[in-house]
Image (cartoon, rainbow, N blue to C red):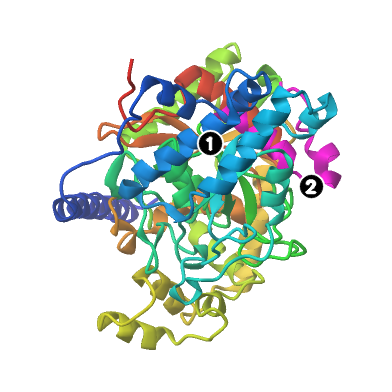
Amino acid sequence: MSVWNRILDALIVLAHILSDRLLELVLGWFLGPHKRVSTPPSVEQQVILTKSAVELAQQIRERKLKSYDIVKAYIDRIEVVNRDINAVVDGPFQQEALELAKSIDTKLLNNEYTAEDLRKQPFLGVPFTTKDSTSVAGKLHTLGLVARRTERSAEDAECVRLMKESGAIIIATSNVPEVNKWIESRNMLIGNTNNPYDLRRSVGGSSGGEAALIASCCTGFGLGTDIGGSIRIPAFNCGVFGHKPSSGAVNMAGCTFRTGKEKDTMVCAGPMSRSAQDLLPIMQVLLEPELKSVLKLDQKVDLKRLRYFYIASNGMPQCNPINSETERVMYKVRKHFENLNDGKDVRHANLPNTKLTGKMWRYWMTQEPANFNLLLGNGVELNPFVELFKKLLGQSDYSMAAIYGLIDGVLPKESEKLIRDATKKCKQALQELLGDDGVLFFHSSPRTAPFHYYPLVKFNDFAYFSLFNVLRLPATQVPMGLDANGMPLGIQVVANINNDRLCLAVAEELERAFGGWVPPFPLKN
């Protein structure tokens, strides 16, 4: 690298640091003092609300806790906390959820469930939520659009149907950006969803309402979808676990108008939870039947037999530089797995073309079956410049982020040959590196959750997540404590296609070693 290139790189880094600090200063002043969600009112409620979904299911089956009491505790929590986080679109579904919970308790009391019934319903009586863009029969299905404010789903999305069959009880649906295409959860119908750790900060998107509800202890677990980080960005920002499965592992029927028959798509549905131990059992419920023998989720993973790698940066000059607290997370993870593996190094790796991640994702979005413009217009073609003019006059039904997306649609396209070649080389290199026993540690983001509106100025950091949508590989977002501002840190765990079990096993080990989810409120003793 020449001296001039090094000077240019240094200037770019300096520009990022200065602009980041300026935005933090201005937006921090504009949005006012720091506030976070409240602590549950009693120790008894706190104990219930902070349990994992697996723990809740077990205690319901053993009749140590009643489903009715659990569902009521979460509904009561939503009623209090949603005033601050603004995450719920429809719900809580108090009457029907409590009636279902009461029926489950009665049947358990009367021993009406056989052992086979309980085996087929691993989440019997456990409350859950899902994002508004994923269909729930009879419930609002707005996709964050003013034009769809009263639209309701005729049937459940396949992932929702499967969770209901597993015994889980739906209690609410959560906020999304318009048609899921933004890295904050804001729209003109519901407004901004706020981060439980600092109400001034972003929850991420598009499954931001889900992450906020889970982190705030308003639900047992949640379902998200991920086309460019939409599970993992909110999970990172809100300090919970989220898993983006291997491409095709979960049927997408009913998620943002998908039929489930789409081929070669980046989008996946997957679980989100406060505990890593919930992810694998939920995946076992959601997994396509013909892939059970391929993903082998029941197969035990020996962490000492795996090979571990890390990448220090994606190399994109458009992204913020990795800050020191984020670097420290990677260091701690590396050292832990080196100790676990009797001193074997977690090896540094490089991949070709990661500098093109943003361009790769932008190109592959144009190959998706969904037309963003038509989705946003609820079937009507929108003129981005007309919408921008209306926005400036305060007359638009769309957020500025949605208008960004419309404008992006008329900008020059990426070079198909360049991007397809770059994607192929990057994917091939990573798959050869990982094989069937390799795991990659990858930064979640160069920095923790920004203030609201920050992404309207600087949004490219999401490329750290979208790379694995482009490559169609499984990735698990793992919380790794809090930074100096009390915001969640985290890391991504990546494996080869259909090796989701490796990601999930490593996530469980990281939770065991570093504590996992940290409540956004002080715990009562």
Identified at 75% across, 22% down, the residue is: 300
Q: Which mark is residue 288?
A: 2
x and y percentages locating residue 204 in the rendered image: 41, 51
Q: Is residue 411 visible?
A: yes
Per the picture, the main secondary structure of the magenta-coloured stretch is: helix
x and y percentages locating residue 282 in the rendered image: 67, 37
Q: Quadrant of the C terminus?
A: top left
Q: For the residue carrying disc 1, how many other residues have a C-alpha within 10 Å: few (<14), some (14-19), or many (20+)? A: many
Is 398 located above or below residue 237 in the figure?
A: below
Q: Give the range drawn in magenta.
A: 275-301
Tell me which numbered mark, 1 or 2, is placed earlier along the sequence: 1
Write down the residue under mark 1.
Answer: 71
Q: Would you say 106 lies left or right of 10 here? A: right
Kindly state the secondary structure of the residue where label 2 is placed.
Answer: loop
Q: Which mark is residue 59?
A: none
Frontmost of labels 1 and 2 is 1
